[in-house]
Image (spheres, coloured by chain):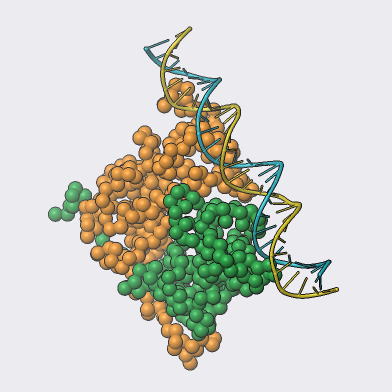
Chain colours: A orange, B green, C yellow, D cyan
DNA sequence: TAATTAAACGTAATAATAACGCTTTTAATT
DNA sequence: AATTAAAAGCGTTATTATTACGTTTAATTA
C-alpha cells in the first residue's frame, strides 16, 4: 500500500534519503566596546584551516552532532574569551553552494556582545586573536566581511528598539559612556541632552552615588541597568525608540 | 612544519574532518491574506515522510547539494503554489539535536508572503494543502507550531517598519482592505482615520480612478503601491512606523 | 579666586500621534 | 422622489514626543 491517510505517496516521494549531508558551521561576530578608545570593535583571528589558512577570519566552528548551533556558537565564544552567559543571537544564514571552496558548508551567523574588560586576555592572545575597529576590518576569508556588515545592521536595528547595548558596558557606566557607545553602534551623532533625557526618563537606569572621575573634574555619575524595571515597563507597553 | 604564519597548529587543530555531516532542511511559513474572509492564513499540508507522516506540517524540503537554502525554499514554494518572484525571507534557524526524531536535521525557517488569488489552486489541491487561519493552526509536526509563531512575530515587526504587507494584496487594493490586512497581521485594532492619514500622507500609494464596489454602495478607490516613490522616500530618510 | 571643562539640567518651538466627530456617496427601500 | 443605511473619506483638537538649542553646576587648576 502506497498511501498514508489518503495521500498518494507515488506523486510526492521525498524521504530522508533525499537529504544531502552538508557541513554546518557557525561563525561568530563578537562585538566589544573598547572603553579607552571608545570604539566598537570585532574580535578576529587567523584562520587555521585550509583553504585560506593564515588569513583573518571570524571565529567559527563546525556544529557537532551532540550540540545545537547556539551551543556550538557559545562553545567557541567561551573557548576564545573565557566568557559564559553572554548575549548571543542568530542573525543570518549563509548557504551559497560555492561560498566555501573547501566543501559544501552552510554557515549560521551569530553575533555576541561582550564586555571587553571581562574577557580572558591570555586566551585571546594564545589564539592570536585581535580586536579590530568596525571601520578598519581587513579582508576576511570567504564571506566574513559580509557577515560583519549584516551583524552590524542587525545590531543597529536591535539597539534602536531594545536596550541590548548594556551588554557591551561594565555593570557600572556613565551616561557619557553610554552615549558614546550608541554613537558608535549607530555610526551617527546623537544630541547629548536629548539622549540623556530619553534614556533617563524611561526609568530603568538606577543612578548610584559613586562617580567616574577619569574623564572630567566634575565626575559623571555611575548608572546601572535595572532589568526588572525594564521588563515591568515592557509589560506596560514601553519600547525604546532611538532615531 | 606545523606552523602557518606564526600560528601553532598543534594547539588549534580543527579541520574539515571535524565537520559532522548534518541534514539541512528549509521550512516555509507561507502567509496569505484571504480576500473574502479578510483573514491572515498559513498554507499547511500533510507530511509525507515518516516519522509523523500524515500529520499537518509546514511545507519544507531538504537542501540539495546544488542549491542554496533560499533556492530550496523558492523551489518548494513554486512546486506547491506555482508562484515565482515572491517575497521570501529567512527568519530563524532550528537546530536542537533531537528536534526531528528521524535524523539530525537542522531546519532553516523562511517565510513568504503571497497573493492567494494568484496561486494555482489545482497545485494546492493536488498536494492536499490547506489554508489555516493564524489562530486556528492545528497541532503540527516537530517544532512547526513554534516556527509559525516566530515567523508571525517577524512579520509583525517587519510590517511595522517596512511596507511589506502589499505582497499579500492584489496589485490594486483599497484602503479599507489594507487596514483589515494590517489589523490581521498586528492582531490589534487600528484607528481607520489615523491609519488612512498616515499611509496616504507618506506618498507612495497611487490612487486610481476605478473603485471597488463589492463591499459598499459608495465604493472604495483602488490604490497601487508605487515602489519607486517608496524607494525615493527611503533615500530621503523616510521610514514607516506603525504602533 | 578666576578660568576651565565635562557633566547635568532646562526650555521653547515644532512635529507627530491619538482620539474623536462630521460629511459624502450611492444603492436599496419606502 | 424622498428616505435610509452603511461604508468611505475628510477634518479638528488636545496631547505627547521630538528637536534644537542655551544655561548652570561641580570640581580642578592656573
Residue A56 vs residue B178, the one in the foreground: B178
Task: Quarter of the image for the N terminus of chain B: give it.
Answer: bottom left
Q: Residue at x 45, y 66 (%)?
A: B88
Looking at the picture, how far across and down is residue B57, in whole percent?
52, 75
Residue B51 vs residue B149, the one in the foreground: B149
Number of marks in picture: 0
Q: In the rendered view, does D19 fall on the left or right side of A25?
A: right
Q: In the rendered view, does B21 fall on the left or right side of D19?
A: left
| Rendered image quadrant of residue B117 | bottom right
Q: Residue at x 59, y 72 (%)?
A: B34
Q: Residue at x 18, y 52 (%)?
A: B4
Residue B156 vs residue A61, the one in the foreground: B156
| Rendered image quadrant of residue C25 | bottom right
Looking at the picture, how far across and down is residue A49, in whole percent?
24, 58
Q: Residue at x 37, y 39 (%)?
A: A39
The reply to whether residue A211 is visible in this rendering is yes
Looking at the picture, how far across and down is residue B97, in whole percent?
43, 66
The reply to whether residue A158 is visible in this rendering is no
Q: Residue furthest left?
A: B1
Looking at the picture, how far across and down is residue A187, in whole percent?
40, 42
Q: Is residue B3 above or below residue A217?
A: below
Q: Is residue A237 above or below residue A38?
A: below
Amino acid at each position: 500500500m502506497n498511501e498514508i491517510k489518503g495521500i498518494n505517496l507515488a506523486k510526492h516521494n521525498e524521504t530522508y534519503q533525499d537529504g544531502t549531508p552538508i557541513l554546518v558551521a557557525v561563525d561568530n561576530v563578537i562585538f566589544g566596546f573598547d572603553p579607552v578608545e571608545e570604539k566598537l570593535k570585532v574580535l578576529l583571528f587567523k584562520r587555521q584551516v585550509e583553504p585560506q589558512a593564515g588569513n583573518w577570519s571570524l571565529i567559527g566552528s563546525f556544529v557537532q552532532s551532540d550540540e545545537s548551533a547556539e551551543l556550538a556558537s557559545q562553545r567557541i565564544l567561551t573557548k576564545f574569551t573565557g566568557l559564559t552567559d553572554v548575549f548571543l543571537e542568530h542573525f543570518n544564514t549563509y548557504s551559497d553552494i560555492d561560498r566555501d571552496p573547501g566543501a559544501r558548508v552552510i554557515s549560521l551567523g551569530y553575533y555576541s556582545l561582550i564586555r571587553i574588560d571581562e574577557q580572558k586576555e591570555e586566551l585571546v592572545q594564545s589564539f592570536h586573536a585581535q580586536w579590530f575597529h568596525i571601520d578598519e576590518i581587513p579582508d576576511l576569508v570567504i564571506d566574513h566581511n559580509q557577515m560583519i556588515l549584516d551583524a552590524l545592521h542587525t545590531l543597529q536595528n536591535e539597539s534602536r528598539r531594545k536596550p541590548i547595548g548594556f551588554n557591551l558596558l561594565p555593570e557600572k557606566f556613565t551616561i557619557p559612556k553610554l552615549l558614546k557607545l550608541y554613537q558608535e553602534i549607530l555610526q551617527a551623532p546623537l544630541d547629548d541632552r536629548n539622549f540623556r533625557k530619553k534614556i533617563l526618563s524611561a526609568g530603568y537606569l538606577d543612578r548610584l552615588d559613586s562617580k567616574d572621575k577619569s574623564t572630567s573634574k566634575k565626575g559623571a555619575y555611575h548608572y546601572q541597568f535595572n532589568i526588572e524595571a525594564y521588563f515591568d515597563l515592557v509589560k506596560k507597553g514601553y519600547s525604546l525608540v532611538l532615531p
